[in-house]
Image: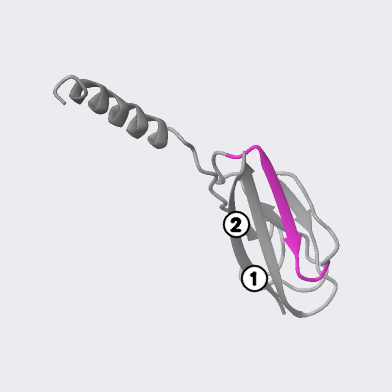
Amino acid sequence: MKALYPFLVIALMVSLITSCSKKEPVSCFSFGLPLDTLNPVDTIVPGNVITFDATCSQEYTQLYWSFSDKKDSVYTGTILYRSFDSVGTYGVKLRTILGGRESVKIDSVRIQ
């Protein structure tokens, strides 16, 4: 039994080190109007171009945006510019993927 003890300790250490080194993707984004827009920052109206910025996301190899008003469309890119045609509240979903691991952030944008 004493002969196995060093091997068990080494196996446990290798297992801990390996599990700690697995990186997880982190989905993060913000959105808003450009600073030069005439409307107040908290008021977004139909036709305003909105900046969606995912530069705060971490540890990913793939990044996908989707919006509730365009259910069949998927967008890529860390920074995305788009507008909405009508008043309403729209869902925004960002998925980041690293290997087989995935992170999702969901928010909504209100168009007044």
Q: Position of residue 86 (x, y in %)?
A: 83, 77
Q: Position of residue 21 (x, y in %)?
A: 42, 32
Q: Which residue in the protein does label 2 denote?
A: 104
Q: Where the C terminus falls, by quadrant?
A: bottom right
Q: Residues within 10 Å of mark 1 (few under 14, many from 20)?
A: few
The residue tagged with tag 1: helix, strand or loop?
strand
Q: Residues within 10 Å of mark 2 (few under 14, many from 20)?
A: some
Q: Which residue in the protein does label 1 denote?
A: 108
- Residue 91 appears left or right of 5: right
- Residue 106 appears left or right of 86: left
The amino acid on which the numbered mark 2 sits, given as a three-letter code, is: Val
Is 78 above or below relative to 106? above
Q: What is the quadrant of residue 109 in the picture?
A: bottom right
- Residue 73 appears left or right of 51: right
Which residues are drawn in magenta? Answer: 60-70
Q: Where the N terminus falls, by quadrant?
A: top left
Q: Position of residue 34 (x, y in %)?
A: 69, 56
